Image (cartoon, helix red, strand yellow):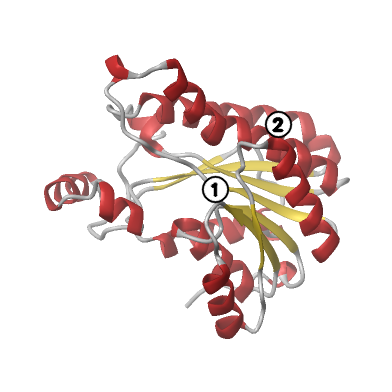
Amino acid sequence: MNATFHDLDGASVFITGGGNGIGAALTAGFLTQGAKVAFVGRSDATPFVDEMEAAHDNRPLFIPCDITDTGALHAAMDQAVDAHGPLHTLVNNAANDMRFNAMDITQQDWDESQAVNLRAYFFACQKAANLMGTGGSIINYSSITYLIGSAGMVPYVTANAGIMGMTRALAREWGPRGIRVNAIAPGWVFTQKQETMWATPEAKAAFLDKQCLKRFMTPQDMVGSTLFLASAASAMMTGQTLVIDAGVASTG
């Protein structure tokens, strides 16, 4: 049975990449709590929005946006606030975990990866802090790829290390304003993209062997921790990274 966080009822929430994968599960999770959700993505999400309205009697606001266009991202966040009121929660979720042989990475590959996986995160945080005023929750999605040093995806791993460092620095800087900044580092969550592109039976079995909990992770497994960090239940948590990975990485 899912927990209910009563203070999220009516809260204004903005999610990047909220129309598919983990982001779609997060959108549904916040809608279930009664939150007013706006999300951005590059692909048309109208069918998903219709589905969410039918399921939850609560229609999210979809704003088409490439988050690497900082001006467009900020305009989308302004549009969300105009529609839903002062921002309560930002969830930086959109990412691109493309694989590269380190010796083959070009400067363009590097810059494009950092633009979506790190730069957009910072400028969304910066805008959110302006829209929140005197309090709110920022949740940055990172990854255990940094904690375990995953090979074959150096730009993405580097960006996720940066997300954890940025989260700690912003928590320190904005704490006096009542703005909390935390991160979530998932393990391997089997979204449709992962299943299509990289999740071979052999790779899945090998990763499952590393987990303490012997069940493949799904997007729904990320919802509870995100709602917790958005709510007053975590009121004195900031600068933290929650590792949700079924026990792969040790942070002690």
Q: Where is residue 95 in the image (x, y as percent from the top left)?
A: 49, 42
Q: Is mark 1 on a helix, strand or loop?
A: loop
Reply above or below: 61 against 141: below
Reply above or below: 37 against 203: below
Instruction: Classify residue 60 as left or right of residue 80.
Output: left
For label 2, the residue is 170
Circle 1 packing at 10 Å, graded few (<14), some (14-19), many (20+), is many
Q: Position of residue 105 (x, y in %)?
A: 35, 19
Which residue does the image show at 46% across and 21% down from the upper left? 108
Instruction: Classify residue 103 as left or right of residue 76.
Output: left
Q: What residue type is labelled 1?
A: Asn
Disc 1 from disc 2: Cα separation: 17 Å
Circle 2 packing at 10 Å, graded few (<14), some (14-19), many (20+), is many
Q: Where is residue 109 in the image (x, y as percent from the top left)?
A: 42, 24
Instruction: Classify residue 111 as left or right of residue 105.
Output: right
Relative depth, front residue between 179 and 107: 107
Which residue does the image show at 75% across and 50% down from the upper left? 77
For label 1, the residue is 93
Which residue does the image show at 69% across and 40% down from the upper left? 124
